[in-house]
Image (spheres, rainbow, N blue to C red):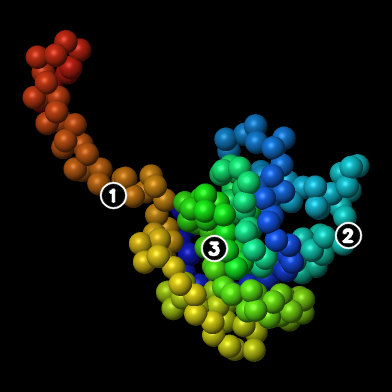
Amino acid sequence: MKPFTKLTAVAAPLPMANVDTDKIIPARFLKTIERSGLGVHLFDTLRYDANGSERPGFVLNQEPYRNAQILIAHENFGCGSSREHAPWALLDFGIRCVIAPDFADIFHNNCFKNGILPVRLPRAIIDQLMEDAKLGANSRVTIDLEAQEVVRPNGERIHFEIDPFRKKLLLEGLDDIDQTLQHAAAIDAYEAKTKRERSFIPGIEVCP
C-alpha cells in the first residue's frame, strides 16, 4: 500500500449528503476482485447519461477536477452496503483523501485499509473548503498527515483528529497483509513448533 504523508492537490467539491456506496460504484461493476480498472466507473450514474456520454455538469467531468486527488463532501459519506469496491474505485480514479463531516463506519474503516485518508471536519469548515475548491486549479489544498492539518489555499491550518494507530499505518503504507508479514518470522517459528509437537498425527510433516 502506498504511504500517505503529505498531499497537495486540487480538491473536487461534491456538495451532497448521504452518498452511498452504490452511488460511488454501482453494483453492476462489482464482478471483479481486481482493484484496478474501477476508476472509470466511479460515480457512474452521476458522471454518465444513459448513452454512456459524460454529463458536463458533474464536477469530475470538468477541468481541473478530472485530476482531483481530494474530494470534499457532506454528511454520511459512504453509507449503504459494505462493499470495499467503493474505496477501490476512488483510489483507482486518483482520490487519496475524502473530507466530510462524517462517514459511514464500514466505509471509513475500508478507506484506511486501502490507503485513503478520511478526514472528519465540522460542516462550517467543509462549507469553507467547498468555496475554496470552486476556484479550481488556483485553489490547491494540502493534507499533512504527520501534523494532522488541512491547509487551505489562504494558508489557514485546520487541525483534524485521527486514531494514532491508523495514522501510523497510513504513514508507513501498511495494510492488513503488510501488518501480518511484519510477524512472518514468529509465525514461521510457531508453525514449525506446532508441526514438531503434533508429529504423531497422520499427515503432519515434521520440520527438520
- Mark 1 or mark 3: name the one nearer the start of the chain: 3
Q: In the rendered image, which residue does mark 2 sit on?
A: 56
**Amino acid at pointer 3:** Pro
Numbered tag placed on residue 182 in the rendering: 1
Quarter of the rendering containing residue 82: top right
C-alpha separation, residue under disc 1 versus residue under disc 2: 47 Å
Seen in the picture, residue 20 relative to 151 is either above or below; the reply is above
Q: In the rendered image, which residue does mark 3 sit on?
A: 118
Q: Secondary structure at mark 3?
A: strand
- Mark 1 or mark 2: name the one nearer the start of the chain: 2
Q: Position of residue 153 (x, y in %)?
A: 65, 84
Q: Residues within 10 Å of mark 3 (few under 14, many from 20)?
A: many
C-alpha separation, residue under disc 1 versus residue under disc 3: 25 Å
**Amino acid at pointer 1:** Gln
Q: Position of residue 18 (x, y in %)?
A: 68, 56
Residues at marks 1 and 2 touching, judged by CB atoms closer than 8 Å? no
Foreground: disc 1 or disc 2: 2
